[in-house]
Image: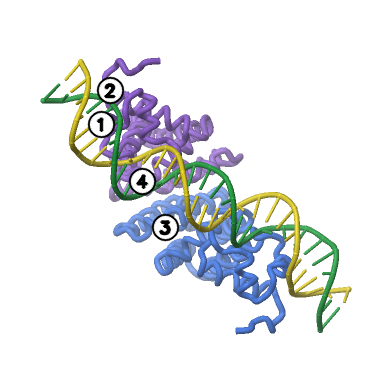
Chain colours: A purple, B blue, C green, D yellow
DNA sequence: GGACTGACAGATATTGAAATCTGTCATCTG
DNA sequence: CAGATGACAGATTTCAATATCTGTCAGTCC
């Protein structure tokens, strides 16, 4: 296949990088590989991304954003009950992570490594997610269901508390028998803590 | 120094292993090193521990038990207010981990690696800790301060929720500015969730 | 002239041969 | 005889030579 005919765009480079990562894994995926997959010299890739790290971070951001968008819908449904929305949001986050980890473990491991050393993109992602959580908590306070001093702080606490169910470090525990029960128990505890 | 005069006991081997680990780190600490430090052949070490993994696990168990004992006192003080005890227990756990991680980062990293592949000893340690937590929760239920269906489940949820403040994976975040505040916020949330 | 190339220096990764380690066991020693 | 030894086979690690990669840039090609 001669994909050389198309103009070289950041978008095409990102797609090719994803493919190379999928094939080779994080340790052996090189910029030269990406260039080869696109039929260009690696110098051209460096015209669009200053460093290999920047390229990887862009791919990581893309991957993280997919989850963010999915959850934004739940967070934004201001017409629905805040407590139910909170539960649904947390369940959706867990389900999304679990599905990715279980469906294609190698690819998940690859992205876990990338997330591990993508500094900026990850903190932005976490900030975005806790922001969504804060929105829900704030709605709950407004509706009188929740009672907290600072929604942002509470949201952050909830996010940290549920780390075991969304942090890739714990992925291997997501398929054990009792997890769903443990998840429910934790969410119950947290929701009770937020209630007025 | 000729420590060869003493009889070779499991205890002495464990002490020597700790020393070797402290000096060489987890990757380069070998059974031969331990034997050399004791002035015996490595075959003798294998008389007391069937494999290198077993030796490492025994050392790890020892290390973990030190924390367990410290916390057992708080958990066992049945005369005091359960809510205060719970807060104190969690704070003590966090403080102990933080002190170890901050005081001697290399040794802490060494033990973090050990903990990583010591299967049995770690689950036993976690079971012991959640057991202590469950005791406190149970006392709270008895006293009417807490209201939960199953103290064991609730204790497990509390332990998981506070992972960010005791799991070595997160050690690098324990020295950031706002941590203590975040810790307090989370504990408040959890205590509120447990209350009657 | 702006997008692309390819040669280059220094950094990093791979490779295979040599050294070391793990775990076993026949043998020794008190 | 209980406890310790050291030689051994196979697995793992180390080390240094070699190959590849990253990031730059002067020069090429529409």
Q: Are marks 4 and 3 in contact (CB under 8 Å)?
A: no
Residue matched to label 1? A48
Residue A134 makes an appearance in the image: no
Is disc 2 placed on a helix, strand or loop? loop
Residue at 38% of width from left, 59% of height from top? B174
Hey, which quadrant is residue B65 in on the image?
Answer: bottom right
The one of B119 and A179 positioned closer to us in this rendering? B119
Dot 2 or dot 4: first in sequence order is 2
Residue matched to label 4? A196
Q: Give the image location of residue C17, x and y in percent.
A: 59, 50
Residue matched to label 3? B171
Residue matched to label 2? A8
Q: What is the spatial separation of the Cα atoms under label 2 and label 1, in whole angstroms?
A: 9 Å
Q: Are marks 2 and 1 in contact (CB under 8 Å)?
A: yes
Q: Are marks 3 and 2 in contact (CB under 8 Å)?
A: no
Residue at 37% of width from left, 30% of height from top? A34
Q: Chain of mark 4?
A: A
Residue at 55% of width from left, 41% of height from top? A179
Q: What is the spatial separation of the Cα atoms under label 1 and label 4, in whole angstroms?
A: 51 Å
């Amino acid at each position: 296949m001669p994909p050389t005919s198309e103009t070289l765009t950041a978008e095409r480079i990102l797609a090719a990088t994803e493919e190379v990562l999928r094939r080779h894994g994080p340790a052996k995926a090189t910029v030269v590989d990406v260039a080869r997959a696109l039929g260009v010299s690696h110098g051209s890739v460096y015209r669009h991304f200053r460093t290999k790290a920047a390229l990887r971070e862009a791919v990581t951001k893309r991957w993280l954003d997919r989850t963010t968008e999915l959850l934004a819908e739940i967070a934004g449904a201001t017409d629905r009950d805040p407590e139910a929305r909170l539960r649904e949001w947390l369940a959706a986050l867990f389900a999304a992570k679990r599905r990715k980890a279980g469906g294609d473990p190698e690819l998940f491991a690859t992205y876990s490594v990338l997330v591990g050393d993508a500094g900026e993109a990850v903190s932005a992602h976490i900030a975005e997610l806790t922001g969504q959580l804060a929105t829900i908590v704030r709605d709950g306070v407004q509706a009188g269901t929740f009672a907290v001093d600072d929604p942002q702080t509470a949201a952050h606490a909830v996010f940290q508390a549920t780390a075991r169910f969304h942090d890739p470090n714990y992925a291997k525990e997501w398929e054990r028998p009792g997890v769903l029960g443990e998840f429910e128990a934790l969410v119950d505890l947290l929701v009770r803590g937020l209630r007025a």
